Amino acid sequence: MAGHSKFKNIQFRKGAQDKKRAKLFSKLAREITTAAKLGLPDPAMNPRLRSAIQAARGQNMPNDNIDRAIKKSQEAGGDNYEEVRYEGFGVAGVASIVEALTDNRNRTASEVRSIFSKHGGNLGETGAVSFNFDRLGAIQFDPDKASADDMLEAAVDAGADDVETTDDGHTVYCTPDELHQVGKALEERFGEAAAMQILWRPKLDVPIDEEAGEKLLRMIDALEDSDDVQQVYANFDLSEEVLQKLTAA
C-alpha cells in the first residue's frame, strides 16, 4: 500500500506539472500573438515579439506552437487581448503588481480582486503601488556566458544602468526604451540571451515572516494560475530557508 500511495502521489504531481506546463504555454502563446498583432509578425523587425519568442524557447515551447501563435495574430476575426495592470496590497502591506492580457476586462478585474481578498489582501487603484517599483528592461544571460567582470564591462559599454550577477547568471538592467539596443550589443559579444523583457523591480523589499510568506505565496500562486494573468511582481523579502520550505514540493 505504501508503494501504491507513493505512485499515486507521483502521478498526481506529474499531472499537476503537465497542467501547469500547458497553462504556461497558453500564456506564452497569448503574449506572442499579442506582440505579433500589435507590431509586425517578423521577430527581426518586432522587438517585443522577439522577446516573447525567446521567453517561449526558454521554457522549451515547441516551434510549432510558436508558429501557430504568430499565424493566429494575422487571422481575421482572431482574439484581441487588451493589456491591463492591477495594483494592490498583499498581507503585511506587501505591494503587488499584476499584468494581464484579457479579452474581458470585467471578468479579469473581478477574478483578480477576488484572489486578493481571499488571501488577506486588497486591490487598489492604478498607481497605488507602482511608485514602489522601477520599470526596467532586463537582459538575462546564463552564468557560463561571461565572468562577472566581463559582463559588467560590456554592460557599461552598451549603455546599461546596472548588473546583478549570482550563481544563476547575469541580469543586466537598462531603461525600457534601450532594452533592445543594449540587448543587441550584449548578444553580439556573448551570444543569445536567455531572456529579454521589461519588468517591475522593487525599490525596497518588505521583510515578512513565515506565516505572512505562506499567505502571500498562496495569493501569488492563485494569481499566476489565472488564465489572463501574465506576470506578478511583489516587494517582499523572505529568507531563502523559509522560501525553500514553503515552496518544497
Image (cartoon, rainbow, N blue to C red):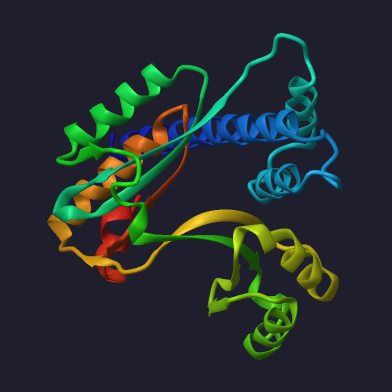
Seen in the image, is 77 located left or right of residue 17? right
Locate residue 249, reporting x and y percent: 35, 49
Location of residue 67 by image quarter: top right
Could you tell me which residue is drawn at 18 percent across and 41 percent down? 121
Could you tell me which residue is drawn at 59 percent across and 29 percent down? 26
Seen in the image, is 140 located left or right of residue 218? right
Relative to 93, residue 45 above or below: above
Give the quadrant of the N terminus: top left
Closer to the camera in the image, 66 or 31: 31
Locate residue 208, reporting x and y percent: 18, 63
Closer to the camera in the image, 59 or 103: 103
Locate residue 236, reporting x and y percent: 28, 61
Tell me if I can see residue 194 in this picture.
no
Tell me if I can see residue 114 in this picture.
yes
Location of residue 163 by image quarter: bottom right
Closer to the camera in the image, 228 or 168: 228
Relative to 209, residue 168 above or below: below
Could you tell me which residue is drawn at 76 percent across and 72 percent down? 186
